[in-house]
Image: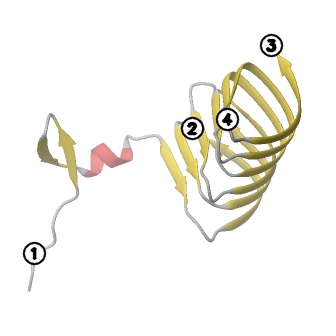
Amino acid sequence: MKKALAPMSIQNNTSVPLSKYDIEEQNFSILGKSNKLKGDFIFRGVVRIFSEIEGTIQVDEDGQLFFEKDSIIDADVQGGHIEISGIFKGKIKASKTTVLTSSCQFTGEIESKDLVIQPGAIVNMKATAN
């Protein structure tokens, strides 16, 4: 019978075993492909979404929210840093930066301190700088 390997972390080009404490103390969330979620969501830390979501999404002001290329979002979103690479319809209120990447298809409203629109993004929006 093979012995199970412990999860590893790479620090300074050396592998270090991850303890249960290391994982429990992290503030991150990942919602994978093929999920369809509907409702009100509140996150902390770094969030990566590959799923289809309808509703409201809130991330703390110091958090980072990434809607990945495969995501399909129909929501009102509030947070610090928000980056969209997928299909998005709705409203965004970002206290820091909103980034619409080259693969983004955005329809809606954005209120953000800083707004970055990369070449190639498909955008139909109303924007307000604050």
Query: Which numbered mark, 4 or 1, is in the foreground of this view?
Result: 4
Q: Quadrant of the C terminus?
A: top right
Counting residues from the N terminus, which is met first, the one under dot 4 or under dot 1?
1
Q: Secondary structure at mark 2?
A: loop
Residue designated by label 3: 130
> Which tag is nearer the camera, tag 4 or tag 2?
4
Can you tell which of label 4 and label 3 is closer to the viewer?
A: 4
Q: What residue is disc 4 on? A: 119
Q: Earlier in the sequence, mark 2 or mark 3?
A: 2
Amino acid at circle 4: Pro
Give the residue at mark 1.
3
**In terms of image quadrants, where is residue 124?**
top right
Q: CA distance from mark 4 to mark 3?
A: 23 Å
| Viewer-side residue, 29 vs 110 | 110
Is the Cβ of the residue at disc 2 closer than 8 Å to that at disc 3? no
Label 1 close to label 2 by CB (< 8 Å) = no
- The amino acid type, in three-letter code, at marker 2 is Arg
- For marks 4 and 3, the one nearer the N-term is 4
Where in the figure is residue 109, as x and y percent of width and height?
88, 34
